[in-house]
């Protein structure tokens, strides 16, 4: 079994080799935590976005989609709290000159203690065999209890210091735990400072009249400031939602996990406006709905879990993450937040404009409450891509690398391969491409032996290969090869469209929700 780090490295190199993700400006040695989507990556990303948009906007008559600008009036970010509070605590190591998130350094330290607990559990499970009771062991084994106590105490102190903005104590904690820089190995730390994650820029031509702007760090605020415009022009009745996908920018302090944490990324967010008092119910409903969306892709129920937040942001009255099992462990993929009336209330206050809804049934006006679902498109891309990449050993002991993407998301749905480059086979193959291209992305490939061509399509994730051979000349049939099972069937050319559609149409996947 390859270790996590090796698997992740494979994911990154496969993404590059097969035209999914490139480092940005690679010829200039790249730009840290910025990536470009290549010819296949752009298609996969578009399909994920489409799968989300259809589930949200097309299938819900009370949800509409918008596309707000990245630039927003700077007061937006005062009202939302981002100017004052969108900070991460950072610390530098004076010897390596590397910058870290102070809270992450401490959390990594506790994660190490946690892995010691896991080791003890594994050892004990082996020793006790079938009679092993994990819960009892965790509660009673003196060493494990001691470890857990230590973790709890550290995290409690970290949480308290961050909440009280006591950055000196965060540094003291790092020193007391004798945390060393993973690069230099030294304990020579600077003070902890708050670092605002928003990118600033300027609007306007002349230096003195220019206006300071921010690149949006989340798409949600474009929805909030348009709440009333959409409600009125769309004659929306509460409860209703506004969805949007688009770029967001964060000057992340530490961004070393490929497209998991980028400085420029894309979000898919939906704000659902509800009557105050009903938010709990809607929060639960959206948690369930979003989990169903993930599970509909068939990437294994065991790879998802909820992580309910205990410590809530100042605007939230409930929050949960959907976590996915990435190659480096379970990590946040999507957030579902019950945001109360914080955002609309703050925009009312800062703009001086009423952002209220008149409820005809109850004959009253109110600022709606909001339940939000927020998922990173790039993170979803990484989840799908890393989960799909498999190394398989075949019956003859050879191996194949296959990207088992959910067929609905695959960039190319079929490759059409003439067995040989003569005898009229390429002509038939080209005609099949011409016929299928109106409905699906298809490619034509005639280079190398057919076995090699199959492997190439496996690695790039194409669900179907269509092989044209001499029999095709006589009876208008072809071989249809399925990527995952490698099973081959003889089908009439006229049937191809229907067979492929059945497996790749969004409808047949979304109905599983
Ligand atoms: P994290 O704790 O990982 O920094 P967050 O809690 O700040 O994430 P949110 O502000 O809730 O994230 O953003 C919603 C979603 O946007 C996240 O669940 C994630 O999928 C995505 N996201 C956030 N930051 C990034 C980033 N730097 N790169 C890629 N995706 C991101």
Image (cartoon, rainbow, N blue to C red):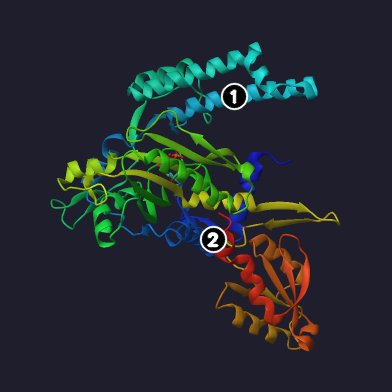
In the image, 502 versus 75, the foreground residue is 502
Q: Earlier in the sequence, mark 1 or mark 2?
A: 2
Percent across and percent down for residue 226 are 26, 54
Image quarter of the C terminus: bottom right
Ligand 1 - quadrant of the structure image: top left
Report which residue position mark 1 lands on: 114
Residue positioned 79% across, 23% down in the render = 129
**Local secondary structure at mark 2:** helix
Q: Relative to residue 423, is residue 181 drawn left or right?
A: left
Q: Relative to residue 270, is residue 201 drawn left or right?
A: left
**Local secondary structure at mark 1:** helix
Rate crowding at label 1 as few (under 14), some (14 to 19) or many (20 or more) other CA atoms within 10 Å: some
Q: Quadrant of residue 452?
A: bottom right
Report which residue position mark 2 lands on: 44
Rate crowding at label 2 as few (under 14), some (14 to 19) or many (20 or more) other CA atoms within 10 Å: many
In the image as oriented, which residue stretches furthest toward the top? 142
In the image, 188 versus 230, the foreground residue is 230
Can residue 351 be seen here? The reply is yes
Residue 160 drawn above or below residue 284: above
Percent across and percent down for residue 122 are 72, 25
Residue positioned 52% across, 64% down in the render = 43
């Amino acid at each position: 079994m390859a270790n996590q780090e090796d698997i992740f490295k494979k994911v990154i190199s496969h993404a590059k080799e097969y035209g999914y993700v490139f480092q940005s400006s690679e010829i200039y040695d790249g730009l840290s935590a910025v990536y470009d989507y290549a010819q296949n990556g752009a298609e996969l990303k578009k399909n994920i976005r489409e799968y989300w948009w259809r589930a949200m906007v097309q299938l819900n008559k009370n949800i509409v989609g918008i596309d707000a600008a990245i630039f927003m009036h700077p007061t937006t970010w005062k009202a939302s709290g981002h100017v004052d509070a969108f900070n991460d605590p950072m610390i530098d190591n004076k010897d390596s000159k590397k910058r870290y998130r102070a809270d992450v350094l401490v959390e990594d330290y506790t994660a190490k203690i946690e892995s010691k607990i896991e080791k003890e559990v594994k050892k004990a499970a082996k020793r006790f065999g079938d009679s092993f009771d994990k819960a009892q062991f965790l509660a009673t084994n003196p060493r494990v209890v001691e470890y857990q106590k230590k973790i709890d105490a550290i995290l409690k102190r970290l949480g308290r210091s961050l909440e009280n903005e006591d950055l000196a104590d965060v540094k003291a904690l790092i020193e007391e735990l004798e945390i060393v820089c993973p690069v230099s190995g030294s304990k020579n730390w600077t003070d902890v400072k708050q670092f605002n994650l928003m990118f600033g820029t300027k609007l306007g031509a002349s230096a003195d009249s220019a206006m300071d702007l921010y690149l949006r760090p989340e798409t949600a605020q474009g929805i909030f400031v348009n709440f009333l415009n959409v409600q009125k022009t769309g004659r929306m009745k509460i409860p209703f939602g506004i969805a949007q996908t688009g770029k967001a920018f964060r000057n992340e302090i530490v961004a070393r996990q490929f497209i998991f944490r980028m400085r420029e990324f894309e979000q898919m967010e939906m704000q659902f406006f509800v009557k105050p008092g009903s938010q709990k119910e809607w929060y639960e409903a959206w948690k369930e709905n979003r989990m169903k969306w993930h599970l509909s892709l068939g990437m294994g129920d065991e790879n998802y879990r909820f992580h309910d937040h205990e410590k809530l942001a100042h605007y939230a009255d409930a929050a949960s993450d959907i976590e996915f099992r990435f190659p480096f462990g379970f990590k946040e993929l999507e957030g579902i937040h019950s945001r109360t009336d914080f955002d609309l209330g703050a925009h009312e206050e800062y703009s001086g404009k009423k952002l209220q809804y008149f409820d005809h049934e109850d004959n009253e006006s109110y600022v709606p409450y909001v339940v939000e679902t927020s998922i990173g498109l790039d993170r979803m891309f990484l989840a799908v891509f890393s989960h799909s990449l498999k190394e398989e050993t075949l019956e003859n002991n050879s191996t194949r690398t296959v990207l088992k993407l959910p067929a609905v998301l695959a960039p190319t749905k079929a490759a059409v391969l003439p067995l040989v480059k003569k005898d009229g086979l390429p002509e038939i193959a080209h005609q099949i491409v011409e016929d299928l291209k109106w409905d699906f992305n298809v490619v034509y490939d005639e280079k190398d032996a057919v076995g090699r061509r199959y492997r190439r399509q496996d690695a790039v994730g194409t669900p179907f290969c269509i092989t044209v051979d001499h029999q095709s000349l006589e009876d208008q049939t072809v071989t249809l090869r399925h990527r995952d099972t490698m099973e081959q069937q003889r089908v009439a050319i006229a049937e191809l469209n229907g067979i492929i559609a059945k497996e790749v149409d969004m409808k047949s996947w979304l109905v599983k929700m």
